[in-house]
Amino acid sequence: MDHIITLFLVFVTLLQTKPILCNNEPLIVGYYEESCPFLEEIVRRQVEIAVLQEPRMAASLLRLHFHDCFVLGCDGSVLLDDFEGTESEKKAAPNTNSLRGFEVIDEIKNVVEDACPCTVSCADLLAIVARDAVALTGGPKWNVYLGRRDSMKASLDDANKFIPTPNSSLETLIANFGSQGLNAQDLVVLSGSHTIGEAKCTSFKQRIYDYDDSEERSYPRQWKNDEFRRVLRSICPRSGRDNALAPLDFTTPARFDNQYFHNIKLGQGLLVSDNVLVAEDVEREIRDVVWAFASNEEHFFTSFANSMIKMGNIRVLTGQQGEIRKNCRLINT
């Protein structure tokens, strides 16, 4: 009996000195198995419908998850409209007139709310949708760890600061990813998402018209008067057609594969931020990763799934933090 009392007192002391932090609950697979058992089937079906209606939407939905996680963490803040003096992250330079798919998320949220009211967070929906968008275009499928809560705030300043731009240098990209706890390999792996999707002319005109033979930064020799630059100029004249679209991967634009890495080996990534992975890597450490993914698609797929899971854990809200929004565009109160 004395032994039991002693153990009890020790346990009470530990509780007093080190309280249980319910807000640090880990994300888990199958979080909604009991509360919303058909969640993943519902989301997958809705993503299928959206991508069938517009194939480009797969890349847009994947991008939403990236832009959410890089600002305040994976908390659904990117989905919020302006509210109570807070400006939406949608207004940030990397997002405005670029980030899309919000209506698809609205529709998915409505269907999920009908099935499981006030249960599933918008942040979790973004994570599931990103996985399904990749899988539907031929990419890897992974188990999504769930249990995120939704933020009740947004940060336009952080969106402008932390989201990489199409003309980012390698140094800037490494710093952006490093600030999120992601390393150089994560940078290369996640850049591989540019194997699908399109970009507006405004995102890469610098890449085709501001070229200088004496400029080494991000302009490989292959760019001099090559056929690729002529194709891009036919899509995007020096003036006008700023909103015209070009595929990020001209070879297999609708399929999630490792072609992106073959492209940037040749200096034929669409964006400056793609080509700097090779052009500015003096130590060749990043180049080695690019070459490895180009030669082994399965290796890229496995690495991509792992990096997506890692990214999806950035500063998540759990436990009693945040809320479960009824409408992804608005906080509940």
Image (cartoon, grey):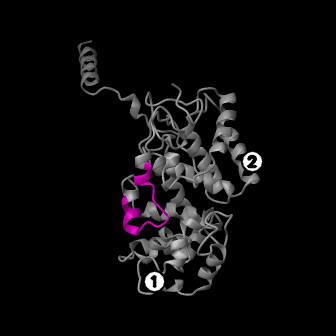
Question: Which numbered mark, 2 or 1, is in the foreground of this view?
Answer: 1
Q: Amino acid at mark 1?
A: Asp
Disc 1 is placed on an element classified as loop
Relative to 76, is 100 above or below?
A: below
The answer to whether residue 295 is seen in the rendering is no
Residue 95 x %, y %? 53, 53
Residue 81 in magenta?
A: no
Q: Quadrant of the N terminus?
A: top left
> Closest to the observer: 24 or 109?
109
Q: Which residue does the image show at 48% across and 68% down from the upper left?
A: 273
Marks 2/1: CA–CA distance: 45 Å
Residue 166 in magenta?
A: yes
Residue 33 x %, y %? 61, 33
Disc 2 is placed on an element classified as helix
Residue 3 relative to residue 41: left or right: left
> Closest to the observer: 320 or 224?
224
Which residue, given by chain and number where applicable, does mark 1 sit on?
212
Relative to 270, is 17 above or below?
A: above
Q: Which residue does the image show at 55% across and 72% down from the upper left?
A: 205
Q: Tell me which segment is drawn in magenta.
A: 159-175
Which residue, given by chain and number where applicable, does mark 2 sit on?
49
Image label count? 2
